Image (cartoon, rainbow, N blue to C red):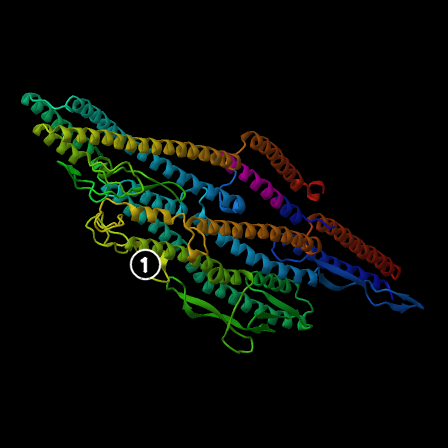
Amino acid sequence: MRITPNITSQNSLYNLQQSRSILDQLQEKVASGQNYNRPSDDPVTARQLVGFADQLRSGEQYAGNMTKATIWLKVTNSALEGMAATMSEIKKLVSTLTNGTDMVQVRQNAAAQLETYKKQLVDYGNTQLNGVYVLAGTRDNLTAPFSGSTYNGDDTDMGIEIGSSITQTMNITGGRVLKGTNAAPHQYGSVDILTELDNLIAAVNANDTAAITTGAQMMEDGALQINAAIADVGGRLTRLDNMQKFNTTTKNVIQGVVANIQNADYTKLAVEIQQQQLAYQATLSSTAKITQISLLDYL
Amino acid sequence: MGLSAALEIGKQGLRNYQVAAEVVSENIANVNTPGYSRQRVIFETAPPTTHNGFPLGTGVKIATVERYYDSLLQKQLVNAGTTSGYDATKSQVLQQIEPAFNEIAQDGLGAALTDFFNSWSDLSLNPTGAAERQAVLDRGQILADQFNYISRTLNDAMVTQNEAVPVMVGDINRMLDNIAQLNGQIKVTQMVYGNANEMRDQRDYLVRQLAENLAVSFTENSDGTTDITYTDGTGTYALVTGSTAGSLSTAIDGTLPDGTARNVVQVTTAAGVGPTTVDPVTGKLGAVMVTRDTTLVGYLNQVNTLAETVADTVNTQHQNGFDLNGTVGGTFFTYTPGQAAATISVDPALTVTTVAASGSAAQKGDNANALAIAQLAKTGQAALAGSTYNNYYNGLVAQVGLDVQSAANVVKQDEAFMKQLTTLREAHSGVSLDEELTDLIKYQRSYQASAKLITVADEMLDVVVNLMR
């Protein structure tokens, strides 16, 4: 084939361009630290990568939800633990009164103490987290649910997302704990602790031993009711903990896969750049040499 | 035949080698002229005469100055030019819009979608929280902004393509006029002087350039002219016949999705028939029209479908809920049907109080509706062929990536093919300086020899003249 200077220069340019663009691609990978920098680098892998990114973002959201729910449940738990402690104080006090006493002073003292315990129960029932009453249900959780023996809240569950299409009830309602609302799905017991406590205080004041005995029994049942709620909260916390662990494992696995696909292998890139640089320099050098040769130099 | 014949032969030699040297100098001068084909002097012996019973030649004569030209190669270059013009333009347009879909390098619509539904998930944990409610509104606006941005990128690209049509049409018309003009000159020149090599080169080069813009076919006529025709799905049109050129023009037909008047191309043939609306699908002009009317519109439709589905499903669910006042929820997003991505926005009437997180009018602390909206993100949508929002969008990202990648690959192949063809053309028609210099020395020596011949003949004549003294 006839080779003209133009063919040589065209070919040299083409080859220099090819070589240069490979160098450029390698440089981009090194600079970004990523193997894929745009969807067209590898559309199939890009599809996977954006899918993984979505999954990771959702995972982070679930993790955040679970952390918040855990705090909520721990606050609920400490309120319930407080109630349980108060209930055992009440039981202890009532056990000394079951046989009745003629001493008015003792009865009044006991009644006053029971009043205090009741207030304490109500205070626990009005536990707040960030301005929200955790035991108030959902009707109006910005107002204290308990006033006296009345419960103004409701017993609606508040579900939250802890996984893709997985929800978990977060709240325990004051009605179920202290007012004996015993509707499904969370059945702890049907003792209206606050009203029974009122009855008990009246019985103590009236020295009605039969009523005091009944009241004592009610307090026993009430304590069990609160313990059942505590057990439920414990169960939920365990579930959240497990889900959190599962979530973290999933996240680690996905991050590992993404890193495998996406993270640039610097050692490999360095070697490739070395090779490509050599090729590029050789092309430059040979181009410079060939294009200089002309018959003119010898005439 | 006497000594004067020898003088005559010498004189012819001088003249012819001078012409040969001129042709060499023309070649050398045009070594870098695009489209130039090298020329060669074809020598032949001058007609012999019979002298003293012997047929003897009367010297050298230039038969023609020939141009190295391969019509088959020209055809291939024309076709390859059309393909490469189409692919290169399409690839360029696609690469311009790819950054809008680059979810790998930066967070775009995909991230905005997830973040929006995550903000509902946050709200479900604290349904009465003002901060969470504000976050839902903000995330909604960011999502709307992302839709607006992608729609604007696509629309801008379409408008740019649309605006390129009249410019290209003007360019093509200029080429058609020039080709017709050159045809006329070539015809006249050939009738008078024989060949018109340079003008043919210029015309053939123009034909190749024209082919990059529009798929044309050409016929070489015996009078030296080249006729150009254009064929597409609507018919065949003569663009250049001899020295008459037809023309292209633009007309308005409908509007682009953003309301800009849509340019279409019309052809008036060399015979004056038309203008007829044509449908170019090849060459740069075809690429501009196809990307504008098919590729980009395809992407925009998908983004619109997604925007509409997100707005509709979120609105429906939002209207099932109740706000802090116990009032039933209003629309969350507003948009203009048909232009959902461009016009989607959070309903301006919506405030922190009227975000409907609750599932019951009486329970403002309820989170049922917030949870239901958050869970929409993981639900397959009938309007998206059963995909979730994110999956649908990720599919679009992959599709854009695939289109860009395959266009870039095709361009690479085109470049290699064009390089091969131009190399072949160069090998055949290109000027080699080494070769020209060799020829130059050859002709110089021949010129010197012819001059010597004249000197010798002169000396011989001198002898003869002196004899008679």
Circle 1: residue type? Tyr
In the image, residue B168 lies at what x, y percent?
A: 49, 63
Magenta span contains residue A24 = yes
Query: Bounds of the magenta span?
Result: A13-31
Chain letter for mark 1, please: B
Magenta span contains residue B217 = no
Picture quarter with the C terminus of chain B: bottom right
Residue furthest to the left: A104
Residue where numbered disc 1 is placed = B335
Left/right placement of residue B352 relative to residue A44 reads left
Decide which of A274, A125 is in the foreground and name it: A125
Q: SS at mark 1?
A: loop
Q: Quadrant of residue B233?
A: bottom right
Decide which of B335, A182 is in the foreground and name it: A182
In the image, residue A64 lies at what x, y percent?
A: 34, 36
Q: Is residue A129 above or below residue A3?
A: above
In the image, residue B150 lies at what x, y percent?
A: 40, 52
